[in-house]
Amino acid sequence: MPTSSFPSPSVWRGPSPLVLASTSPTRRMLLESAGLVVEARAPGVDERAVEADCTGQDPKSSPEGLALRLAEAKASAVAQTCPDRVVVGADQVLDADGRVFHKPTSLEEARAQIGELAGRTHALHSAVAIVQGVRVESFVETARLTLRPLDPDAIAAYVALAGADRVRASVGGYQLEGLGIHLFDRVEGDHSTILGLPLLPLLARLRASGLLTF
């Protein structure tokens, strides 16, 4: 597909749209808002199997390493189906003093996760893997977030107002870009990293590969 056929305004110079190995609407929105042309594909990776394999003394057994391994697995899985395309995979791990949180499966679990994080600082490790042919480049960025002390009534009120879909959509039971902002005392880190796709370092790498117009 020639670059000239892409919607305007676009800064993307690749011959075909960038392939995002994720169905996250937030990640796609971040890329498209930055003027990239994006095609999203589901990676079909068993995340818990990757996590189970990420053990022992391997440096990728850390929460940061797990995020990297998940991003690489997703990018590589999609790249196998389109080896001539530029593929970006991403994943995010919530790390509370070394403990990895997963998305809550129920409102009760969401309330429990928020209660466990209340009054504490946790880390969000957002990893990205870029596959271009046989070349794989990956990196991880970290944001640190501190929830204010919350009593059970405040947590219950947030969960009820946010709704089941939102609190089950993100690890920790919150979405900072919505009502979840009320849960926090302090946020340290780039906003796109918190949303799950560190945009500035990703764009820098794509630019260095000649894939952006400026």
Image (cartoon, grey):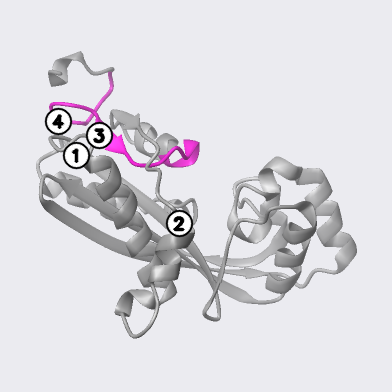
Instruction: Name the residue: 49% across, 51% down.
Output: 195
Q: Are marks 1 and 3 in contact (CB under 8 Å)?
A: yes
**Of discs 1 and 4, which sits in the foreground?**
1
Stretch of the chain drawn in magenta:
8-27
Instruction: Classify mark 2: helix, strand or loop.
Output: helix
Q: Position of residue 27 (x, y in %)?
A: 43, 42
Q: Name the residue tied to disc 2.
A: 47
The answer to whether residue 141 is above or below residue 178 is below
| Side of 134 where 69 appears, left or right | right
Residue type at tag 3: Leu
For marks 4 and 3, the one nearer the N-term is: 4
Instruction: Classify mark 4: helix, strand or loop.
Output: loop
Q: Name the residue tied to disc 4.
A: 13
Disc 2 and disc 3: Cα gap in Å? 23 Å
Q: Name the residue tied to disc 1.
A: 86
Instruction: Name the residue: 61% across, 68% down.
Output: 186
Specify the quadrant that holds the N terminus: top left
Instruction: Classify mark 1: helix, strand or loop.
Output: strand
Residue type at tag 4: Arg
Q: Position of residue 162 (x, y in %)?
A: 75, 45
For marks 2 and 4, the one nearer the N-term is: 4
Disc 1 and disc 2: Cα gap in Å? 22 Å
**Of discs 4 and 3, which sits in the foreground?**
3
For marks 2 and 3, the one nearer the N-term is: 3
Disc 2 and disc 4: Cα gap in Å? 32 Å
